[in-house]
Image (tube, rainbow, N blue to C red):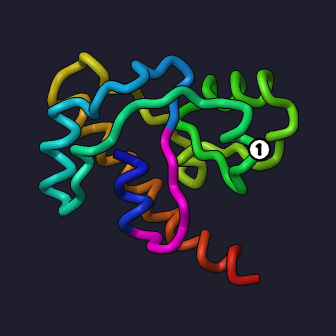
Amino acid sequence: MAEGLLSASLPGVKVRSAGLEALVGHPADSIACELMSHCGVNIEEHRAMQVSRDMCQEADLILVMDREQRRVIEERYHFVIGKVFRLCEFSDQDVPDPYLAGREAFRHSLSLIEDGARQWAQRIPRVSSR
């Protein structure tokens, strides 16, 4: 959901999504697809992928959902320290994983993701244009 919202908000910026324990090759959850379609964003073609060293090396910015993900990525790939932030960094919140938790969990996570994506989408063009 975050990839979809950020991609829609930042045309011309390469946005990729990957997980630490991704179900590689699986599509986005049907609830996520439905909620995102209400936002005008189609994520039907999304397929899960595992985060990798190469992805982290290519990235200028790595956004994670929670503190634990940040810790694991920074521990696994020391060179990323300084470019890993939580999606909701500016509101000091973690985004809970709604997988298998039902529609309300997805709605709650989407609400946080929308807020975090909006905040980053406002900041990224200012930084990248310098």
Span colored in magenta: 9-17
Residue at left 16%, top 46%?
A: 35
104 with respect to 65 (left or right): left
Q: In the rendered image, which residue does mark 1 sit on?
A: 57
102 with respect to 71 (left or right): left
Residue at left 49%, top 42%?
A: 17
**Whole-percent x, y for residue 93 in the image:** 51, 40
Image vertical order of residue 108 relative to residue 58, above or below: above
As drawn, the residue found furthest toward the bottom would be 129
**Whole-percent x, y for residue 9 in the image:** 40, 69
Q: Quadrant of residue 68?
A: top right
- Residue 119 falls inside the magenta stretch: no
Nearest the eye: 94 or 45 = 45
Q: Quadrant of residue 63?
A: top right
| Amino acid at the residue labelled 1 | Gln
Image vertical order of residue 29 relative to residue 89, above or below: above
Nearest the eye: 61 or 23 = 23
4 with respect to 39 (left or right): right
- Which quadrant is home to the N terminus? top left
Residue at left 76%, top 82%?
A: 130
